[in-house]
Image: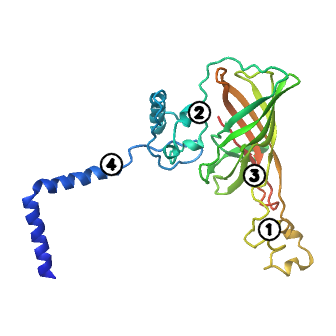
Amino acid sequence: ASSHRDRAVSHRKQSQQQHPAAAVMAHALCSVLAAAYVPAMKPLNARVAPMQHASPVMMASDATKVGAATLAAALVLSGAAQSALAGPFTRSDIASLTYDQIKGTGLANTCPKVEGSGGTITLSGGKNYKIDELCLEPTSFAILEEKLTKSGLVTEAVPTKVTTRQTYVLTGIEGDLTQEGGKLKFTEKDGIDYAPTTVQLPGGERVPFLFTVKSLVATSDSSNIAEGTKFTGKFMVPSYRTGLFLDPKGRGMVTGYDQAVALPALQAGDDSSLFKENNKKFDVGTGSLELKVTTVNAELGEIGGVFVQKQPSDTDLGSKQPKEVLGPSF
């Protein structure tokens, strides 16, 4: 074995002496490949929670949009667009990107920005209108909690950190827009209008909730849409979990055990202490939303703005008291 190893080393040295350029070229090629493997792009700065590493963003073959979109991508990936209220791209820019170009960049969890040209969107009476591709992107989540102070019990908003994946943006929402009594009324019909989300309080407690605007009915304060127009309304908040969910003791709403099998003696006569844990139910809450229009593009029929939302958190199928969750987009 020693003799075989000595012959191999001698053969390698002789090969390098006969072909020194080849040896240098192989080393240089490996260096180039290693350098090319190091990612040169920075991750897209998140609005609510840390993002994963971003892949380089490249535009599709649309000569009229490559310059502006590439500049926007460079600004966002370098962290220069942190103060934007919406995503770095317009809807037409995002439409020119392929799935592979968006994957891993965090752009799928942002709303497109509206480049306003001013003006007012006037709606004629007696006609049916529709709001299409409505997108809601929260910039933070907070939990309302009561705090005991010298002046008494005070309710304050406690900031949180998102612990779930970056999938909390609601998009593709559509609904009817009608005129009633000199005001506009928006009725939500369809779209990606819910997102299971979990946030963590500073003390470590985690609060799950279903971020949603299902069946939203919002009324404006004017008959036309312009900068400063406000929409306010309420929506339905379904249960975070469905009837097929089983808790750690195998109890569920439509399947599983009716009670904790490991505690038969405690529940033989009176199970009032565990009634809420055993009696699973599908809770439906009510949330409220206020939206203010800040940008209008009358030529394209697009509007943009900010919103504040309040809704209850998960009740664990009726066993816990819900907390109030705030989802501002400022």
Between disc 4 and disc 3, whose residue precedes?
Answer: 4
Callout 3 secondary element: loop
Residue bearing mark 2 = 91
* Visible residue check, residue 90: no
Say which of marks 4 and 2 sits in front: 2
Between disc 1 and disc 4, whose residue precedes?
Answer: 4
Say which of marks 2 and 1 sits in front: 2
Question: What is the three-letter code of the residue carrying label 3?
Answer: Ser
Label 3: how many Cα within 10 Å (few below 14, some 14–19, many 20+): many
The residue depicted at 64 percent of the width and 20 percent of the height is 299
Q: Position of residue 298 (x, y in %)?
A: 67, 20
Placement of 209 over or under 114, stated as above or below: below
* Visible residue check, residue 181: yes
The C terminus lies in quadrant? top right
Callout 4 secondary element: helix
Placement of 287 over or under 269, stated as above or below: above
Q: Position of residue 159 (x, y in %)?
A: 65, 45
* Label pair 4/3, CB-CB below 8 angstroms: no
* Label pair 1/4, CB-CB below 8 angstroms: no
Residue bearing mark 1 = 252
Say which of marks 2 and 3 sits in front: 2
Between disc 2 and disc 3, whose residue precedes?
Answer: 2
The residue depicted at 45 percent of the width and 39 percent of the height is 58
The N terminus lies in quadrant? bottom left
The part of the image, by quadrant, that contains residue 264 is bottom right
Question: What is the three-letter code of the residue carrying label 1?
Answer: Gly
